[in-house]
Amino acid sequence: MNLNITEEKVFKDPVHKYIYVQDQTIWDLINTKEFQRLRRIRQLGTSYLTFHGAEHSRFSHSLGVYEITRKIISQFERNQYPGWPNEEKLLALCAALLHDVGHGPFSHSLEEVFDTHHEQWTCSILLEDTEVNRILRQVSDDFPEKVAAVIRKTYPNPIVAGLISSQMDADRMDYLLRDAYFTGVNYGNFDLERILRVLRPVQGKIVVKESGMHAIEHYLMSRYQMYWQIYFHPVTRSSEIILRQIFRRAKELYEKGHAFDWMPDPIRKLLDGTITVQSYLKLDEAYVQAAFLHWEDEPDTLLSDLCSRFLNRRLYKYITIPDPDESLLEEISRQFIAIGLNPAYHMEIDFPFDQPYDVYRPDSKKAGKEEKTPILLLDEQESLIEISAKSDIVRSITGLHQGEYHLYYPEEPLIGSKDKLSPALRELFKI
Ligand code: NI
């Protein structure tokens, strides 16, 4: 069952101008409580502490991914390309809309500490007793499972998953443009309309007409710039470190039997690893930050200090170190302990790296490494060529790009006790 709405619904959007909804199923999904919850989760986690404009939500991003997918499919339909399976349209649109529905508050930091994964939550929300599941089952009994298979990349027709998850998918195209818009930087801009015009469905893949190569180069450069200028910004990394330390400390205290003044059920279940879909859906960023406000008054000085640092943006500072050799770290750790700091919470090495574009070759596939389909160009003879074979620019950003080693630490206690630190350490920390 796939009903069109009598009058299409339109959302005003700063990135795509308008977002058009024509299917009743999509409209109903947007109005579920699980999807509306995404309004209360920021797209960029703690980046708002670095770029104050970055308050946009996963709700707006999810609508954007849906809209880009809709535009790509509509282009395929208008041109009647034989490679696109028209009967998969609603499936692709639902998967695009729902691909991030399992994100929790400050997802990436939370996932690291509690060893959960938003993709698994997305599948639970699709398949368990939720409003989303009820709407999807109205299409057909096996429709929720089909959407979950697209999200897990196990759906038998890979062209559907390729729209939402590949090296040039609707997800990436939306978040680069949206994050650039809301942070106020220009790096993330590229010509989306041009890219949408040159995409073609060929041999079960989405490929690019060769004349569109320069638009793709621009998109890959934007992605490269956004990672280093925005996503890996050292101040954002610092706030993520503090966030992880808060969760780690709360978990540690909880396991020791500490009696928290404020411990609502969903957070307790998160800490003891018994969280269910229904309690997970109650967790949003306001809820987690309310916990931090309460924990700021906890008698445990470590937890209260970390919460206060996060809420009031008194983040850790960082120094760049050439190579984190063990003896240096041991010396720092020893002197930190001597001035009353706890190295497990007060020093952290961060080493960002990124692969802007991965030329996947079957012979280079390592066990456990996720397969990344390369971007393919379609030339005038209808043959497919991997883009870095043609483009010097893409070749120049292929492979691993590594940042510097940063050591994060709280600066105030170091300044307060600087007389107790060795001259070498004072020089290293520039105090
Ligand atoms: Ni996404």
Image (cartoon, helix red, strand yellow):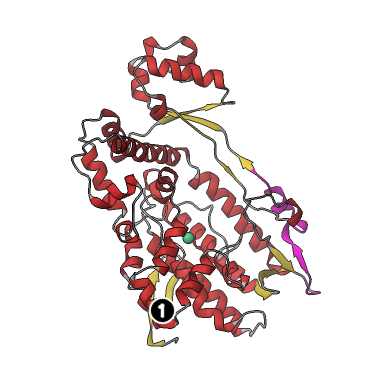
Residue shown at 23% from the left, 42% from the top: 293
Q: Position of residue 358 (x, y in %)?
A: 67, 53
| Residue holding disc 1 | 137
286 drawn magenta: no
**The furthest residue to the left:** 261
Residue shown at 50% from the left, 60% from the top: 177
In the picture provided, is 70 more to the left or to the right than 344?
A: right
Q: Position of residue 231 (x, y in %)?
A: 49, 47
**The furthest residue to the bottom:** 6
How crowded is the residue under tag 1: few (<14 C-alpha within 10 Å), some, or many (20+)? some
Residues rendered magenta in the picture: 381-400
Residue shown at 61% from the left, 81% from the top: 85
Which of these two is toward me, 160 or 146? 146
Which of these two is toward me, 152 or 312? 152
Tell me if residue 237 can be seen.
Answer: yes
Q: Is residue 343 above or below residue 355?
A: above
Q: Position of residue 109 (x, y in %)?
A: 42, 45
Quadrant for residue 403, please give it: top right
Q: What type is the residue that disc 1 sits on?
A: Arg
